[in-house]
Amino acid sequence: MSSLITADLVSLDTALGEDAASVITALAQMVAGAGRASDASQLVADARAREAQSATGLPGGIAIPHCRSEAVTQPTLAFARLVPGADFGASDGPADLVFLIAAPAGGGQEHLKLLSSLARALVRPDFTAALRSAPDAAAIVALVDEVVSPAAVAETAPAAPAAPTTSATVTRIVAVTACPTGIAHTYMAADSLTQQAAQTDGVELQVETQGSSGAKPLSPETIAAADAVIFATDVGVKDQARFAGKPVVVSGVKRAINEPAVMIAEAVTASTDPRARRVEGGAVASEAARASDAGGFGLRLRQWLLTGVSYMIPFVAAGGLLIALGFLLAGYDVAGDPASKILADNTLTNLPAAGEHALFGSALLTYIGALLFLLGSWAFGFLVPALAGYIAYAIADRPGIAPGFVMGFLANQIGAGFLGGIVGGIIAGLIAHQIAKRPAPRWLSGLMPVVIIPLVTTIIAGMLMLLVLGRPIADITDGLTDWLNGLSGGSIVLLGLLLGAMMAFDMGGPVNKAAYVFATTGLTAQAIAAGGTEVKIMAAVMVGGMVPPLAMALSTALRPGLYTSSERENGKAAWLLGAAFITEGAIPFAAADPLRVIPSMMLGSGVAGAISAGAGVTLAAPHGGIFVFFAVDQVLWFLVAIAVGTVVSAVSVTALKQLGGRGGDAVVAADEAAPVPAHV
């Protein structure tokens, strides 16, 4: 195994800048210069993305910026002893000892154990003192090699959980520590809590580290014997239900490093306080923001929405692509009842006639296309229920899923669309959460999450939606549609601009759906035959809906350093989603950074819609993107409109992100879009 650090990865008593960004850039360039990273700018972007989630400065003049990156070719440490120090966000001032911990995106477990061993050593005063007094780079390398040697790793590995004591004078505490990358803060927090507990009379503490080098879960016996729980995490706690009913102290992972004594004292107090917050049946939040008084409900709301969106995206992708493939094989005239009739009246041995507009004129392909169209239509029917169901799940865990799905289906039935699904999901989740908080008799507790909570929640939330909220939300959508109908006699270019911008405003929400319904309801046989305004409107709507995912894909390709690794992966998928007219492919970007993304998307989509309408592009298919090019008249202008709109939006969003910086909000939200429940 090659050394994690070499002399050319050490910089002693130098000035690399006064802020974290400058120092990270300098250290990343050292890593790339040593041949351990293929792209310094990519490593900088990934390290800064991690820094934006929470500052990596620690008390005592230490900073440990760290990340996983596809640019890193082997696990590496780069070290700088700074004169003067740089601000890494620590409460006691600048850091003069900085380790950049760079791990490959798919780093092996043994390497990650070595990196975590270094993190543990940094909480030891003797180690940091030796780093400050080391005369040269070779001495630094020797010090680091000593703490990351296999023997040292074995010594610093957490001991197996001890058998719970039966002493009535001892407070038994269990803790879970976890940070987004699971490399450094996870283990430093664990060691800080463990060391503090060892110095505190009457406290017995066991820690479960949920980090990159694996975790040894606390035994059920240890958890059952615990008097209180500490969750020091910046991400979701795995299998939180194990701790249900225990008094809990929740914070970000850095607080456990900075204030272990305070957290242990809070846990001791909570263990005997009947009013203390407790882990609920499903779990408590992985609230990184609780380390800060700011954020609060706003951050949790964003987490709920992102959880719903992340579970919804597969339905969008599968349904949209199946519909597009159905159009490609069977023609756009297979939509609706014709497809259902083909399924009912035909089999592989009794094939239908080829569709009038089928691309290949094949009866077999027409039949297969009809089946694909039906599959896609049914998958699309789950979009709003999945969104609502998993928003409720994010709030209340499993008891919220069934009521949330029902609210989403209800929103579809009454015409409330995506907005109704979001509102219904939040209402269902909050109601289920509140019911779950109430104590239940032991004989009833087993029925609560699977029967009582879903039943009562569905009744209450359903009545609220049906009797109070559903109709006003549906009326908003209907009002938008009526307004559009009133504009159809005006300038076709202005209408194309307006419809294109509407398609990008909420990317699948009520405004988007109002524009889409306005377009599709005009696709009559007469309008298609005449090539009138109705089919021009359909073309403007489709190009406007294709632009947002294509623009975000282009922006992530042009300037990947402005985006997190997960956003870059979403950008790759967005090429295909945009080409297939799946506007929802841009939702993760808009949810993470709405103030910069949404206006940029509306600008490009509006331009695309105006060009399409002004050039007289017509479209006789209601869905499919480039897969229904055979139903497009003026194909060249259709492609020009998409290309110009995509470039306008991509340039706009890239410029806004550059002028405003990468932005903590954008980076944090995007990295938190993983489908991890964010419970209240």
Image (cartoon, rainbow, N blue to C red):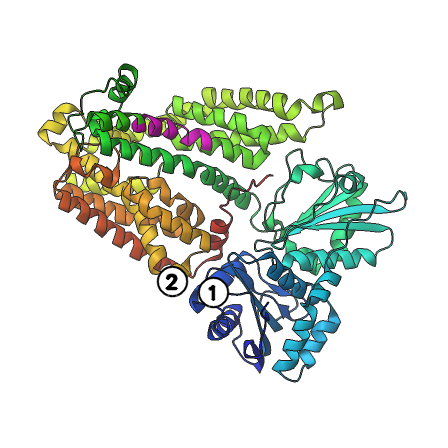
Please report the bounds of the magenta region as a residue range: 372-386
Viewer-nearest residue: 620 or 658: 620
Q: Give left or right: position of 541 versus 678.
A: left
Q: Secondary structure at mark 1?
A: helix
Figure quadrant of the C terminus: top right
**From where the camera sits, is residue 504 visible?**
yes
What's the residue at 62%, 30% (across, down)? 434
Marks 2 and 1: CB-CB under 8 Å?
no
**Which of marks 1 and 2 precedes in the sequence?**
1
Image: 191 above or below 545: below
Which residue is at the far top?
345
Q: Is residue 677 magenta?
A: no
Q: Main secondary structure of the magenta part?
A: helix
How dense is the environment of label 1, judged by Cα within 10 Å: few (below 14), some, or many (20 and up)?
many
Judged by depth in the image, the label closer to the viewer, 2 or 1, is 1
Q: Position of residue 171 (x, y in %)?
A: 83, 46
| Residue ID for mark 1 | 43
What's the residue at 23%, 34% (across, down)? 328
Q: Is residue 375 magenta?
A: yes
Q: Position of residue 93 (x, y in %)?
A: 63, 70
Image: 189 above or below 76: above
How dense is the environment of label 2, judged by Cα within 10 Å: few (below 14), some, or many (20 and up)?
few
Q: Position of residue 583 (x, y in %)?
A: 33, 41
Q: Give left or right: position of 294 versus 634.
A: right
Image: 461 above or below 33: above
User: Alpha-carbon distance for marks 2 and 1?
Assistant: 21 Å
| Residue ID for mark 2 | 659
Mark 1 residue type = Leu
Image: 19 above or below 356: below
Viewer-nearest residue: 528 or 607: 528
Which residue is at the far left?
530
